[in-house]
Amino acid sequence: MPLPGHGTRMVARMSDAPGPGTASITPWLSVLRGAEAVEFYQAAFGAEELHRHANEEGEIVSQLAFAGTAFWLADDPGCSPETLGAGSVRMIVEVDDPDALFARAVAAGAVVVAEMYEGHGWRIGRVCDPFGHHWEFGRQLH
């Protein structure tokens, strides 16, 4: 659903097994230092690593999950926001207590982009992780 006043940004709800006529979107993050990224997401979000594949150079592909949702990351220097100088996607994570997840991410090393605030029917805030990806933590107020 679009957030009022925020263009066409969408919140995708993921499910384990989409039914007929449905789909799910699972983010795949390109990073430098994949193993460090896994450690950060474990500390920042309480993520659990579900799958990891490493090549001979130590580059990884990893699937992580937290709060009922999953995402992938991979060592992919050519597409990493750190390499490109910016990212083009934000993750919006809807949780019951966005303030707690926001604080946990900041304590783990994320940089505050927008403090937690209430507006447009949401309690929401945004951080940038050490790998250049932006995360918004929020919940609808109504």
Image (cartoon, helix red, strand yellow):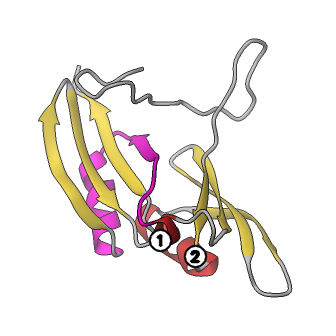
57 left or right of 119?
A: right
Please check the rendered image and state whether residue 104 is part of the magenta-colored stretch, yes or no.
yes
Label 2 element class = loop
99 left or right of 72?
A: left
Q: Residue, x 26% and y 21% (percent of image)? A: 4
Q: Position of residue 62 (x, y in %)?
A: 70, 65
Asked if the residue at tag 2 contacts the one at tag 1, i.e. Cβ–Cβ closer than 8 Å, the answer is yes
Q: Is residue 109 above or below residue 27?
A: below
Label 2, on which residue? Answer: 32
Q: Residue, x 41% and y 73% (percent of image)? A: 130
Amino acid type at circle 1 is Glu
Amino acid type at circle 2 is Leu
Which mark, by number, is residue 98? none
Residue in front for this viewpoint, 44 or 27: 27
Residue bounds of the magenta highlight = 85-108
90 left or right of 14?
A: left
Q: Residue, x 52% and y 30% (percent of image)? A: 12
- Of the residues under marks 1 and 2, which one precedes in the sequence? 2
Q: Position of residue 67 (x, y in %)?
A: 50, 47
Which mark, by number, is residue 82? 1
Residue in front for this viewpoint, 77 or 51: 77
Q: Residue, x 42% and y 43% (percent of image)? A: 93
Q: Is residue 122 above or below residue 106?
A: above
